[in-house]
Image: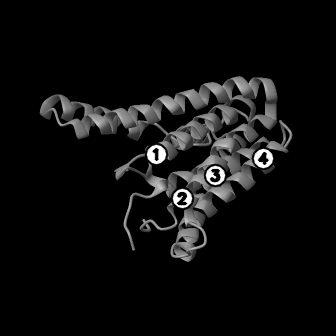
Amino acid sequence: MKQTKQMSETHLLAILLAGGGGFLDAYTYICRGHVFANAQTGNIVLLGLHLTNQDWKKAFYYFVPILAFVLGILICETIQTFFKWKKAIHWRQLVVLLELICLIFAGFMPLGKADTLVNVMVSFVCALQVEAFRKMNGNSYATTMCTGNLRSATENLYRYLETKNKHCLKNSLQYYNVIVFFIAGAAVGSCLTLRMGAHAVWVSCIGLLAVFLAMFHSRQEKEA
């Protein structure tokens, strides 16, 4: 079988997914109870604070999306295990399809009492995405958080300044580009959420649909 770079590891898909990641973070924070559903560090900190204050209700509120994130990782690994070698469709496409179903359903949920359920679904979606899409042109990265990308971008920039290796510069610029698209996604998500409310989450599905369709071009690629 001819071995080529997988579509799922291209820079194009990386920026599409990063834009969606920023969008969802803005969405859950603005209209779903100030919860960061993508990266769980903030929720873990808030969980610890409320446990210290013995505010069990608030602690549980932040524990639920953390648990959903863990579940998302487990489900993603299960999908990979059972569908990795299927030729009709890439296993990552199944992950994206599951993301789309969850986000479409989330858009129908009213603001207020349903926020906890929506945050659970978005945390689940982000876990699926961060676990399934971990490589960009052979380099590790994340689509739903920026700390690791910022470290890698700056590390590669330093290596370029020290060695003048253009490959390091290319890596650095790609990492910074992913961060820029994450910020752009958050900005667009903020604007649209303020205008559209709960339904704004559907806009993020456009990028995911593009990712799903793009991966049909990689059927003959070597499996990751």
Q: Amino acid at mark 3?
A: Val
- Residue hosting label 3: 125
Image location (x, y in percent) of residue 129: 56, 52
Q: Separation of disc 4 and disc 2 at Cα?
A: 29 Å
Viewer-nearest of discs 1 and 2: 2
- Residue hosting label 4: 106
Residue shown at 50% from the left, 39% from the top: 15
Q: Separation of disc 3 and disc 1 at Cα?
A: 14 Å
- Residue hosting label 2: 217
Label 3 neighbourhood size at 10 Å, few (<14), some (14-19), many (20+)?
many
SS state under label 1: loop
The disc, 2 or 3, on the residue closer to the chain's N-terminal end is 3
Q: Separation of disc 1 and disc 2 at Cα?
A: 22 Å
Q: Amino acid at mark 4?
A: Ala
The disc, 4 or 3, on the residue closer to the chain's N-terminal end is 4
SS state under label 2: helix
Q: Separation of disc 2 and disc 3 at Cα?
A: 23 Å
Residue shown at 46% from the left, 32% from the top: 179
Q: Is residue 155 visible?
A: no
Instruction: Looking at the picture, tell me which residue is in the foreground, 221 or 201.
Output: 221
Whether tag 2 and tag 3 are in contact, CB under 8 A, the answer is no
The disc, 3 or 1, on the residue closer to the chain's N-terminal end is 3
Q: Specify whether 114 is left or right of 219.
A: right
- Residue hosting label 1: 142
